[in-house]
Every structure is written in structure tokens, then in C-alpha cells.
Image: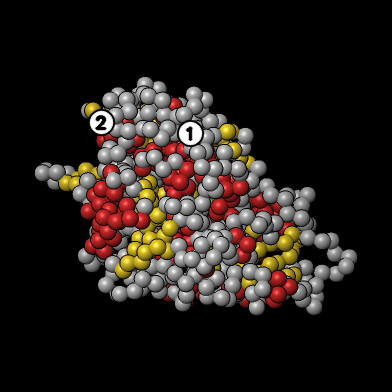
Amino acid sequence: MPVEGIKVKHVGRSFAATFVSLLSLLALVCAFVPGGPRASAGIKLVRAGGDDARRQEETADRISPDLLEIARDPATRNERVRVILQTDDGAGAPLKALLSRRDVKTRGELPAVGARVVELPARLVEQLSAREGVRFVSPDRETVSFGHVSLTTGTDAVRNASADSFRGNVVNSPTGQTLDGTGVGIAILDSGVDTGHMAFRDERGNGLRVVKSIDFTGENRTDDPYGHGTHVASIAAGNGRIAHGDYIGIAPNAGVLNLRVLGAQGKGRVSSILAALDWVLQNRSAYNIRVVNLSLGTPAVESYKNDPVCQAVRRLVDAGIVVVAAAGNLGKDSAGNKLYGMIHSPGDEPSAITVGAANTFGTDARSDDGVTTYSSRGPTRGGWTDALGVKHHDNLVKPDLVAPGNKIIDAAAEDNYLITAYPSLDAGVSEDDKRRMMYLNGTSMATPVVAGAAALLLQANPRLTPNLVKMILMYTSQPLAGFNQLEQGAGELNVEGAVRLAKLVRTDLTSQTPLGAPLLTTTLAPPAQTTIADYTFAWSQGMVLKYGYATGSSLISSYQKIYGLGVLVTDGVLVTDGVLVTDRTMLSDGVLVTDSVTVSDGGALGDGPVYLGAGVLVTDQTFAGDGVLVTDNALGADSCVQAMSATAKGDPTASMSSTREAGDPLNAEAERMEPTADSTKEDEPPPRPYVSKVRPIKE
């Protein structure tokens, strides 16, 4: 059935032009693709103001907010600043002309990453960003020696603290071992792994941590000619032996199982995925496979109840294996409109941990983090048709959480297709093929961050069930201000808090443990906050649950029956006459279930304003929001273009720093950045030192 939407008022950034609220019905917009499904229209955004206002806003979108503040402040706009200018391939005449001005100096060029270092008066920053070919302008920020992903997720806090101490909160640790994934197997179902890459050697010698490689594509190879799987595997479990550990994986000593289900062009079949999942189920004990990473997917057409991959995932979860799946990269269409209802399969499976992509804007502190524009949003729209021809959608709240996924630097497979087709993806870290690193973007990159985190939790407490792992990751996540639960789930991954809580969970829990029994080994709950890079944030203290969310300290103080094997966390709620009610045989008193979707204010889950009223998802009504609700989870040909664009380009914002390895033959040239002949005169003031003023923003 076609879905009609309502144009609504959208509140933008403080510097944005005013949006107009128009009330109208939208016609069905369909794109025909041979053999493909139809797409439906919904809620669109209409900008107010003339061309000047629109151009000003578009220009501002290509500047980091802290730099824009400096450029527009009368007290600082005449000061000189040092910026990173990211451009598309080549520079047009207007851009070249501006860069040739006497008061604009190019201090260095980094063609491998499509960037250059420029020094100029702050007042010219907006003119610079308006030039054709400019993707983004950001400050030349100070970098740190820690790996960005491992630091900003809280993983470094876990590894660098003593095994029994987390920011003053003492927890029991029977082994006192370093948390690095040792002993845990992570199965990577992807395009293969380049086992010759240094990222997959062990920490002390040259032993290979890829413990098994199997091809399910029929191409009779297990390397990675496409380049996706190697990058994914190194995010989850790459070591810290490159660039002084700047790009260390989340679980750097975990065992990697390379199950190749995507061919040389990055494509595969459902049958290949099913064969690999079947192999995992049969061989999980031999390799202690506790985590499966699925940075892939297909449009969710059938209900998860009928989807064969979803059903296979359910079998693995029931057997005690944590399955982490990407939400998808279809958060917007080619016109830039927000899309809802584009969660891919098997990310629509309730038992999977479904991961969206967060944007860290290249900073370790999480005060500026947001959800990427391309990260697929819920609700899930797979469904079934009844005997009367009426379509029923699953409408589950997804994703479950988000993790860093924009412009992530990690291992590059030798001579891979992606870096050949898009040379700017080369991060310029090393010319050695065994140490080369590359940029990639998407929920595919966010997913192995969570998979690695799950491995750390299972190393810290091997008795955790997949449902407990899922609850802990959501309960300790950071709600990102300005984003709703269909965009971010419970919030952004927080490894420090998750490990701290996981170590407190009892190890003697069984299917016979009564509902409401103590869940933790202590009567004192851990402080529900975490500090990362000097920024302290509150945990969500809840979890997304079917059509809404659940909150309450009883989620961690008392055992809930939804934490056991063979059940779903969504089994804790029932729908009666279109109303979501709590099943008190599965959830204890003290757990509050709410059937609405809220926009976070940065506090605990549910503290912000209501985005969708109660019962909308339960009854499959059309909801009015800030984007387009797609009825059948398909965009036609546009979906392929948008997904590939997200992978190769990501959101044009500040990114992780690229650190060239010491001793690399090109290192001296890259670091020298010698000034040009017309460099800054002695009487010119030095560039303004960068002081971060980044504030949370909505995309």
C-alpha cells in the first residue's frame, strides 16, 4: 500500500536558515527497475529562504562547526588559522585562484588522502568551502598517539587500566588478564582476508591469528581481491604493530576465522552466507567461535520470521554465538532526504545486534559525536501479506546501537579493487603492501567495532549469553543528543562501561535461575557514567525492545528471563489489542516498558521528547517525522548508488588522522611540508592555535 506523509517543520542547527512547515499530502513516487520493487514517498523537507540563504547553509555544511564559529566571530575572523582542506579529485579554476592569493598559503599536500594543509585568515574559510570541488574544511587539530577508534570507544580505558580497576570502580577479575580478545574466535563473513598483512600477526612474533580460511563463493580463493573483508577484520581484531598502534583493532589478539562469502566484485549469494553460517554452527566448539560479524546484507523483503538468513542467525544465537550485523548504508536518497525503514537483512533479525554508523568527526572526545547521514534507520520493514492481501510490516525498532563508522583507517588488502578504483582511499600510512592502510566508511565498519567489543566482554566473562551481551552493550551506551531511537538505538558503543558491567555479572546463571534473582555479584550497581578523553557522559540505562524501549535499574540488578538462551529479548513484551504490555513471566517488576520512540537529549534513554507516539509502530500507522518512510525497504537502482557512495566517500567531515610510519621511504617527504617560496613573512602573525569548541550537531 502506498504511504502518504506530511511535510513537517524541521529545526536545524543554530546557524541554519529557517525551515518552513507545509502541510500537504505527498504523491507516491515510484522508481521502476527491471525485476525490482517499487519505492514509496513520505515525509519530505522543504527549505525556506532564497538562493543566498540556501547557498550559505550548504557552505556551512562543509565546515566543521568549531571552525565556522571562529570564521564568523568578529573577534577572531581576521586571525590566521591552519586548516585541512579535503577536495575531490582535481581542483577547479576558482579554487586554484583562491589558493593563489597572497594571504593564503599551502603548507603541504597529501594527494593520497585527497587533502592539503592550508593557512589563511579565518574570514576566508567560508569562501574556501564554497569553491567547487571542496568537500570539507576543518581545523588542523592536534593528534594523539592512541588509536582513534580504540580510544573513542573506551577500549583503551579497558586495556590501559589494571585488570581489576576501572576509574576507581573495583570489580572482580579471576584471571587479571589483559583484555584483548585472547581465546575468543570471531568469524568474519565477508570478501576474504589478506592473511599476509601485518595486522593479523600475533603481538610478539609472526604467528598468524587467522586460524581458518574457507571459500564459499566457488572462486577457490580465500584472499581479498575486493578489499572489504580485510578492512573489516582488522577493525575487529587487527594488532597494534603498525604506526605505533594508531589503528589497533578492538580485540587485537582474538582468533579470526576468514569465511569468504563475497566474490571479487564484492557480491555474493544468500546460499553462500547460509553455507558459512551452517559451518560456524557445526564447528563453533573446535575454534571457540563466540562472535560472528556480518558486514553485509540484502533488502529486508520478507519478515524476519521467514527470511532464511535471519532464521540461520537465530539458530546461532540460540547456540550461544553473538551475531553482529550491519544496519545498512541507505539512510538517505540521492536528493539527500532522510529515509526511514531501510534496515537490511539480517540486521532486521531481533536476536542479532544491529549496528548503525556514528560519526566521531575525527575527535576522541565524544561531545561532538552524531549519527552519519547514510546509516540506515528503522523501523524494520520486512513483512508478510495476509489472505486478504493486506501487507503487515515487522516494524521493530532498529538499530540496537551505533559505533564509529565514518572514514575509518585500517588494513588494506594487497592490490584490492576498492583502492584501485578509488585511489584516494589509500590512507598514506605505508608503501609496504603488508602494512598499507586505507579509509572506508559505513555501517560495515561500525559492525566489527561492536563485534570486537563483544569478544572483550566474553573474554572478561565467558558465561555471558548473547542476550546478556546485547543488553549490556545497550545499557552502557551513550545516547547522542538530537537523534531518535530509530537512528541510534540505545546510543553509541561504550566499551569501558560495558566491560565494567560484564565483569560484575554472575557466572552461575542458568535456565533455572528464577526471575528477579540477583544478576550481579555485588549489591552496589556500578556508576552509570563513563569518562573518555576527558568527556563524561551518562549511560542510556535501558535497551530498545520491539516497538519501544525498556528502562529501570532492575535490568542490571535482577535476572530477567529474556537473558537466557533460546528466547528473544523482544519476548519480554506482548501486543494486546494494539497495545504493548509487559510479560511479567519474562520481565520482573522494576522494568518499565514504553511503546514510543524518543529523541535523545543526551541523558538516559527516554529522557528526551517523544518522536513517535505510543502505538504507531504497533499498529503500522504512517508516522510523521523528519524524513521519508519507505514502505517496502527498497529504493530501486538508487540504493546501489547510495550504498557505494557511502562506502567510498562517507560523510564529508573531519576524519581520523593519517600517520605515516617512521622509516617509510616517503615519510621524510610527507613530514617535511616545506613552505613555498612566498611563505609567511616574519611580520605576519602566526596561525591561530586551535582550541576545540566542537558542539553536538544534527546531520
Horizontal side of 558 relative to 540 (left or right) equals left
Provide residue 44's location: percent of width, then percent of height.
Answer: 40, 49
The residue that label 2 is drawn on is 575
Check disc 2 and report its element: helix, strand or loop. strand
Provide residue 609's location: percent of width, then percent of height.
Answer: 47, 32
Foreground of the two, 674 or 104 = 674
Q: Amino acid at mark 1?
A: Leu
Check disc 1 and report its element: helix, strand or loop. loop
Q: Which residue lies most toward the left here?
A: 387
Against 426, residue 274 (above or below) is: above
Horizontal side of 134 relative to 219 (left or right) equals right
Task: Name the mark on residue 261.
Answer: none
Q: Nearer the viewer, mark 2 or mark 1?
A: 1
Foreground of the two, 482 or 357 = 357
Foreground of the two, 692 or 48 = 692
Residue under the image location 67 percent in, 70 percent down: 662
Against 592, residue 296 (above or below) is: below
Horizontal side of 268 relative to 246 (left or right) equals left
Residue under the image location 55 percent in, 31 percent down: 527
The residue that label 1 is drawn on is 504
Against 585, residue 119 (above or below) is: below
Residue under the image location 51 percent in, 42 percent down: 175
Quarter occupied by residue 71 = bottom right
Crowding at dot 2, Cα within 10 Å, few <14 / some 14-19 / many 20+, comes out as some
